[in-house]
Image (cartoon, helix red, strand yellow):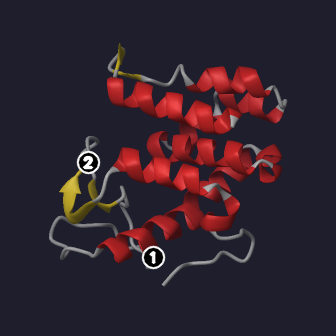
Amino acid sequence: MLFRSPSYQSAKSMISQEAVDLIKHFEGLRLTPYLCSAGVPTIGYGSTFYEDGRKVSLQDPPITKERAEDLLQFTLNRQFIPAALRQCPVLVAHEKKLGAIVSFVYNLGAGRLQSSTLRRKINAEQWSEAADQLLLWNKGGGKVLKGLDLRRKAERAIFLG
């Protein structure tokens, strides 16, 4: 079942398929529960909750790829698209830019966007400066991480696309 928020369109029409594919690529697909790098039980494409609000548990049964797709759409519609639009309302008219920022928020959380220069540049519609800000979020433990670097470059390409 695909959740459709009354105040937001579905993720498939609100952000580009390119952005959804980017999230899927970098999150990866795991059909059995696992602990993510932050130590949180996760399933599918990085989902930590089910539609009913239950947290994913390591004891949960495996899911299908279709179920993982539904969880991703639910999570995007219910959490990440609304969070990105609350913080950067100018993105409502920019499908690709919104998709890139949703990928960023999906990876790092809405709190990182909230107090960032990235957010200020977006809301000022300083698009090239905002795109460059994405590239600064490629570190873990003070070191550039290849996976984050690749993800930020891909998000920047979508943002500018």
**In x, y percent, where is residue 122?**
76, 33
Residue 114 drawn above or below residue 55: above
Quadrant of the rendering where the C terminus is positioned: top right
Q: Is residue 110 left or right of residue 141?
A: right
Q: Residue at x 42, y 29 (%)?
A: 150
Q: CA distance from mark 1 to mark 2?
A: 19 Å
Name the disc covering residue 36, or none: 2
Residue 113 drawn above or below residue 61: above
Q: Are marks 1 and 2 in contact (CB under 8 Å)?
A: no
Are there few (<14), some (14-19), or many (20+) residues within 10 Å of tag 2?
Answer: some
Q: Nearer the viewer, residue 127 or 124?
A: 127
Q: Nearer the viewer, residue 131 or 4?
A: 131
Residue 147 drawn above or below residue 143: below
Q: Is residue 93 left or right of residue 26?
A: right
Kindly identify which residue carries mark 1: 51
**In x, y percent, where is residue 124?**
84, 30
The single residue placed furthest to the left in the displayed view is 59
- Element type where label 1 sits in the image: loop
Instruction: Tell me which label, 1 or 2, sits earlier in the chain.
Output: 2
**In x, y percent, where is residue 5?**
66, 75
Q: Residue at x 56, y 51 (%)?
A: 18
Q: Residue at x 32, y 51 (%)?
A: 28
**In x, y percent, where is residue 6?**
72, 77
Q: Nearer the viewer, residue 21 or 92?
A: 21
Which quadrant holds residue 112? top right
The single residue placed furthest to the bottom in the displayed view is 1
Which quadrant holds residue 119? top right
Residue 139 drawn above or below residue 67: above
Are there few (<14), some (14-19), or many (20+) residues within 10 Å of tag 1?
Answer: some
Identified by mark 2, the residue type is: Cys
Identified by mark 1, the residue type is: Glu
